[in-house]
Image (cartoon, rainbow, N blue to C red):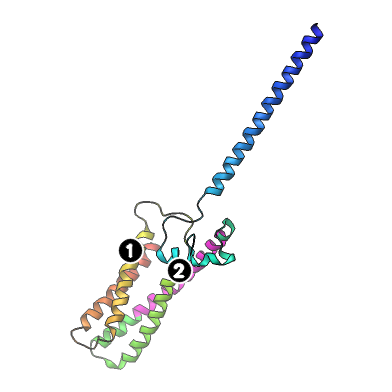
Amino acid sequence: MRNFARILIAVFLLSFAETAWSQNDTTAVDLLGELNAQQEEAPLLPNSMLITQRILWGKHGAMRSFKKFELTPENRQNELKLRRAMFIAHQVVGFATLGGMIGQGIVGSRLYDGNYDVKDLHEGLAVAVNAGYFTTAGLSLFSPPKAVDERKGYSSIKAHKLLAVLHMSGMILTNVLADKASDPDIKPYHRAAAFTAFGAYAASILVIKF
């Protein structure tokens, strides 16, 4: 009788141990599944993007029709590498454009004072500055979006973007008024737009660097 009772106790303990092990194993699998689900649910794109980025790189953007740019974690890593390369080019071309703007300011001031010998140089520099400026802008506007949303509050990036709105408006207005700059009534506005564009552009570079 005692042996039978011992056997029953042993069977009970083994059953209990097996159940406990099974529950622990199931819990571990569930936890692993939860972690994987969280990773899969992590957003691949930030909520906030420029309209140009949303058109190209959004969930249903134009670039998503290419297999190389399908929205997957691996492809997003490649996109972020492309973004970095584009922003390095953005900085290099941006500094070159700033140098061109300084030269254009010097030549433009001489032309404004009546030295028409520099008119051709002024126009040539205008073409170069416009090419550099809009290339710089394009490298930013059409780059893949960043990995995460920007933090709330002030940041140098936000200041950079706000100044970009100002200097782009100045650049567009400068070009619109360029053909009429020979008119004495228009000339001051053309000059003011050009200096506004230069000042805001220089400031946008300074807030990033300092």
Amino acid found under the numbered disc labelled 2: Phe
- Residue 82 as seen in the image, left or right of residue 94: right
- Residue 187, above or below 55: below
Q: What span is colored magenta in the figure?
A: 76-102
- Residue 102 as seen in the image, left or right of residue 55: left
Residue that label 1 marks? 162
Distance of label 2 from label 1 (alpha carbons): 17 Å
36 or 62, which is in the foreground? Answer: 62
- Residue 203 as seen in the image, left or right of residue 40: left
Viewer-nearest of labels 2 and 1? 2
- Residue 43 as seen in the image, left or right of residue 94: right
Q: Secondary structure at mark 2?
A: loop
Crowd class of label 2 (few under 14; some 14 to 19; many from 20; radius 10 Å) = some
Check residue 119 in the rendering and tell me which mark sits there, or answer none: none
Residue that label 2 marks? 142
In the displayed orientation, state which residue is furthest to the left: 185
Q: Residue at x 70, y 23 (%)?
A: 17
Find residue 102 and report its image quarter: bottom left
Residue 130 rendering spot, x and y as whole percentages: 38, 80
**Residue 206 highlighted magenta (yes or no):** no
Tell me the quadrant of the picture where the C terminus can be found.
Answer: bottom left
Q: Residue at x 54, y 45 (%)?
A: 38
Residue 52 rendering spot, x and y as whole percentages: 42, 67
Residue 136 rendering spot, x and y as whole percentages: 42, 73
Q: Secondary structure at mark 1?
A: helix
